[in-house]
Image: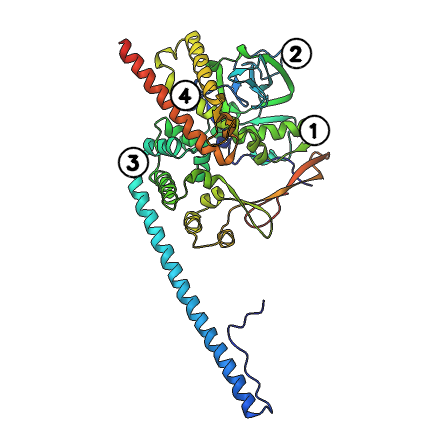
Amino acid sequence: MADPLEAPRSADDLYLSRSADRDGVPVHRPIVTGDVFADVEIPGVERVPGDDQQLAMIVSHPCSMRQGARLNDHVQVIRVVRREPIRLEEWPKRYYDLMPLPDLTVIVDPDDIMSVDPEAELAVRSAEGAHAGFFELRGRVESPQLKVQSRIACLSEHGVGLLHQRMTHHDTRHSPRVEQLVQTCAAVFAEIELWELWNERLIPGDVLGCSDKLADELDRVAVMFDEALSAKRPIVNKKNGFYTLRGDLGIKKEEAKARRAIHRILEEISKGSKKEVTEAG
Amino acid sequence: MDHHLVPPVPSVGFRGADTRTRISNAERTERDAGMGRLRALEHHNDRAAWHETTLRSLLHQNTDQKARMGLSELLGELTADWGLGWSGIAHLVNVSVPAIRKWRLGGDVSPARLKALAQLVAFLQMLRDEHISDPASWLSLSMEDSVSLEEIRKTDIYASGGAIALLLYAKGYISQAELLSCSSAARYSKSQHTRVVRAPDGQLSIISTGVEDSSGRQEE
């Protein structure tokens, strides 16, 4: 009997960031597959035990959830509920109808446990943080419902690969390799990473506390970023030939060059912004 | 191919003296050539080992120099100047992507990890010194084993401790076959195979096969 599914090496391997992390979940990161939000109502999905926080995870594919910089009007999500922990070795063998989310809300570090009975406390803390996303509790929500401030976790690229593998297997009984699933999303994740960097550099710190202003700033940078990535650039020595940085991010041979170019554009914009601020001051 | 490093004992038998001498001379020449080859091989191996040692110390020296740059400078150089992404860096220095995120946000880094980052910068610089115009791109491209037709990634070779072998390959001192034979990096089948198997829940599943781990076992 073969195990069709894969497991992460540890819970930490699954997440890029969680609200329980020291630095929390960055508001600068663009919304993408595997993000978990609180207080999301999913039309057509009934209330179930353990859903008191109304958590929802985006499961739309990263390649198809945006038009340029703009999120589609709706994205697909699954309900995330509290449930007893699932051990990593059980991932490949059981629970095919869900995506385990260990330590989602509580980070369990054995080194931090000072109790007289560390085993018991470890179990209690693991139970507190354990959640799972149920594939049957799936629906589409309006994108404006998903606010970066209410995001409680982001999956890592490998985590998104595991999510896609389990979901595909649940829907079709076919289990593609996680490594290949990650490969298909690599260009979009590269874009998300660079976009986050642009947000960090170009959004003034004083708007972070104000939801509306932050949303406006995120939109402003999103447009700039999208313009830079989708601009048609002439290919040297090729008449009528052009390329885009977005396209090049998806070509292995060109990716590093495209990344450097995107960093350079950001550098120029940052300098321009600083100059504007200085002149205004 | 049948290599005789030590020549077989000549059979003298009832041959004439003239023939014996001719055979003996031919054998002596071959034996001398063989001994010469052994000495050359030994000499070559000594030279190769010495060359590797010097290359390793050069990499160490450059690494120590780069380590003085500090964490944020190193990360900045790897991303903005060399064009690597966070997940690429994480893979090459064997840490998680969240670890890189923590470092970017000012988290602590162990001396060993700082050295690994510095070594990556030094390694890329050494590749550029070998006239590889875009070392990050060069590193991201895969190679194909001409015998098994499997794909082997240079990034996997680097991550599994193959920096020196990659430098020797880039400098043209070893062939691709030699690089691949000394690497313990994973090999990926380029052909897609799927199999229908009985899953632990008793139902059938379609699974992808083809990836092999470093020990050559098929992943089940």
Amino acid type at circle 2 is Gly
Q: Nearer the viewer, mark 4 or mark 2?
A: 4
**What crowding class fits label 4: few (fewer than 14 Cα within 10 Å), some (14-19), or many (20 or more)?**
many
In the rendered image, residue A16, in percent from the top left (x then y), is placed at 47, 27
**Disc 1 target residue:** A172
Cα distance in 3D space between marks 2 and 1? 22 Å
Q: Is residue B70 above or below residue B129?
A: above
Count of marks overlaid on the render? 4
Both marks 2 and 1 on one chain: yes
SS of the residue under disc 4: helix
> Residues under labels 4 and 3: Cα distance?
24 Å
Q: Amino acid at mark 1?
A: Thr
User: What's the amino acid at mark 4?
Assistant: Trp
In the displayed structure, B197 sits above or below A261; it is below
Q: Which residue is mark 3?
A: B69
Is there a contact, CB below 8 Å, between mark 2 and mark 1?
A: no
Q: Is disc 3 placed on a helix, strand or loop?
A: loop
| Residue that numbered label 4 is attached to | A198
**Quick check: can you spot residue A179?**
yes
Q: Compare residues A119 and A126 and report the one nearer the observer.
A: A126
Parent chain of label 1:
A
> Callout 3: residue from which chain?
B
- Quadrant that contains the N terminus of chain B: bottom right
Q: Distance of mark 3 from mark 1, alpha carbons?
A: 51 Å
Residue A217: horizontal and vertical position, in percent?
42, 12
